[in-house]
Amino acid sequence: MSNILSTAATNAAFLAIPSDNGKLVATIVQGSGFTQLDQQHQLKCPGIYIAVSPEGEIYVGVGANLLARTNRFTATPTRPAMLLYITGNTTPLPQESALVIERIVFQAFRSAGLKMFNRYEPAGSPIALGEYAELQADWAAMISALAPIVPGLACPWLDPGHTRMPPPDPTDAYHEERLVAEKRGIRAVVKRTSRGYVIQPGSRVKAEPIRSAGKLCSMMRIEARYAGLLVPDAEHLRLTRPVFRQTLCSCSRFVFTTGETGIWQRPDDEFPMFEA
């Protein structure tokens, strides 16, 4: 645990750490604190929890009632080495805010290279771009307060996971192919590689109302706008950096918020390779 907790915190059963902006509070529970956890009534509220195993594996979860949600960890002899709860400080977190913070924290930990135990990436919840930016600021204020106490978990959010390109493959030159899709004023270009597809910068993306698409698609779009990956372009959005997706169907959902895959075709001005 030396890579997670500071020396000053290793023997504390309970620690409460408010964020620098006062909007969130982190509660650390370890050791003898687990036997007193049912008395912590302030944790009967929405928020996220971070479970750290003795081996340093981390699980990030969310709950409408954190005390009830984490009972599976605390009611058995096999307990995590530490539980860290993040809740609203002066007012309870709305459920959708807790879902978004869960995703932000998961992405921050994964980008920092921490060993994650989650089977799936949290999907978050569609919210307005301004609300999302405020939650990002809240997490930044939280990690600033956590850094002296739990330095291993004070991880900043860097960028959306879909901005990270897979490592280059020597066979990409054989697989590379450009495909174009156009629909109602939207034109996007993808490049096929051995591992999937890369949506090219300059592609137009549909400026879809927040709740008109699936939860994950909407969340990706909000993150992309927050990170400057998508910028306004007339009535649509324009892509500023490449985005990697594994399938054409996923490219379609990102660009058009639809599952159509038949609209992708070779551009007319490209020479058809390997055709007689």
Image (cartoon, helix red, strand yellow):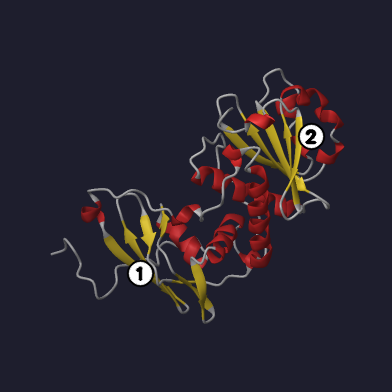
Where is mark 1, residue-wise?
Answer: 180
Q: Is residue 70 above or below residue 235?
A: above
Q: Residues within 10 Å of mark 2 (few under 14, many from 20)?
A: some
Where is mark 2, residue-wise?
Answer: 68
Residue 2 position in % (x across, y down): 57, 28
Residue 122 position in % (x across, y down): 60, 46
Q: In this rendering, would 72 be left or right of 115?
A: right
Q: Residues within 10 Å of mark 1 (few under 14, many from 20)?
A: some
Count of marks overlaid on the render? 2
Residue 99 position in % (x across, y down): 68, 50
Circle 1: element type? strand
What's the residue type where badge 1 is placed?
A: Val
Which residue of the protein is positioned furthest toward the bottom in this rendering?
A: 234
Label 1 and label 2: CA atoms lie apart by 50 Å
Q: Residue at x 37, y 66 (%)?
A: 200
Q: Is residue 68 visible?
A: yes
